[in-house]
Amino acid sequence: MKTFKKSLSLILAVCMIASMAAIATVTASANSGDPIRRPLVTDVVNKGAEQVETNTYYFYMPNTAQWRNEFNDYYDGTEGSHAAGIYWWDGSYNCKGNYADFGLEQDWPGYAVTEKEAADANIFKAEVPKDVPKIIWNNLVDGGQDASQPQYTKAAQTMDIPSEYYDPDEEPHGFYPNGTTSFDGMIFVPNPKEVSINPLSQKETIGGSWCYYYGDGTYGIYPTKAEAEAAGELLSNGQFPAYGLQTDCDSASMLVGKTATVTPNDSTAVATIADPAIASVTQDAATGAATVTGLKAGKTTLVFTLAKDGGAEEKVEVSITVTAAKKANPMKVTTVKKTVKAKALKSKKQTVKGAIKVTKAKGTVTYAYNKSGTTKKIQKMVSVDKKKGTITLKKGKYSKGTYTVSVKVTAKGNKDYKSKTVTAKAKITIK
């Protein structure tokens, strides 16, 4: 199945809250039985003094009591005929700031849309200026701010919907099917799993995704109807396109007693741990984020399961590796004073064994000559065997005295112990 881009979600919550804050300030009024109260978007745009280029946007209005109620009924005088609203802040003929020119008392909920597709009365169509960056579809109900009024909770809207094109890989705006270079002629389909209640106004807000509209009440994530049919993904009647369940990581590593957090792109996905003896999991009800707490070392799998229509399930697995914290390496390093005769050094190099003693080391031990820590007079005359730690003094003329040879000793460690490095200062007397 072709993967569908992630739908509009709480990543736009800041914009949504700002918009709803403005909505909450307007006066309460009902839309019922007043066909001239809100101008039709087609009249505003197509008959305006300034002729502008437009895009055609479609909207599937949810067929629920929240979206279709007595406060948006009878708009055109026909019982059961519900209108939709469309609103935008910026661009030509924007609602905000221009509403007075159209005889309106306030800008929200925007312009009325009553042009329905004959194939599906739930689909609305609007011509919107191309320079409009974002739109909001709604049910043309101004709920007002008086919670005692019956229309207060009858208002519903979408989240801010980007209507400008952007690169498909640009985040966080990848909310449309692959291959789209314009939303002109496309349909916005609400996702029933993305319904939220705005904390400021208590009105319903819903997210969703753009789909290709095929012009006959059907739509999908493929550019053509034939492609959608071939893939078995021709949608209609408010069906929301399935998109692959994903997580913010494919695998996670953690120490015993520590935690790892994995978040799915659908908050309704349920997280479980394959081996509860290795790790336990708790899940945030709002975001679906699963917090895994390790109990003992081992490997297990975190499984997100999403129930789909028809009883089918979609799963995504995250590999969880739980490891024990490594212990400190118990390596001990001591030095033993050694003596070398100056006379012997005149004729040939001298190898000094046993100057560095290593005990209790965990893991392979290696030695590295530390020139900067060695007595300056002999710095260029010393070498150290990397595996054995023996010190070699090159052939040459040495002044009598006691010299320091610095060596860094490292125990690599293993699965249970950390690595450890100790600087040893061996004393060598030349007499």
Image: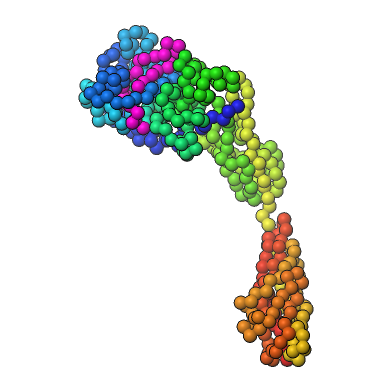
Left or right, 397 with respect to 116, comes to right
One can see residue 42 in this view: yes
Position of residue 99 measured from the top left corner of the image (x, y, whole percent):
25, 26
Position of residue 255 measured from the top left corner of the image (x, y, whole percent):
64, 50
Left or right, 175 with respect to 231, comes to left
What residue is drawn where x is 51% and y is 30%? 178
What residue is drawn where x is 25% and y is 30%? 97
Q: Is residue 9 magenta?
A: no
| Quadrant of the image containing the N terminus | top right
Q: How is the image coloured?
A: rainbow
Left or right, 6 with respect to 250, comes to left
| Quadrant of the image containing the C terminus | bottom right
What residue is drawn where x is 38% and y is 35%? 15
Dividing the picture into quadrants, the one containing residue 227 is top right
Left or right, 64 with respect to 231, comes to left
What residue is drawn where x is 70% and y is 44%? 299
Dividing the picture into quadrants, the one containing residue 86 is top left
Q: Specify the farthest residue to the top.
A: 78
Q: Which contiguous range is marked in magenta?
A: 106-133
Position of residue 430 measured from the top left corner of the image (x, y, whole percent):
72, 88
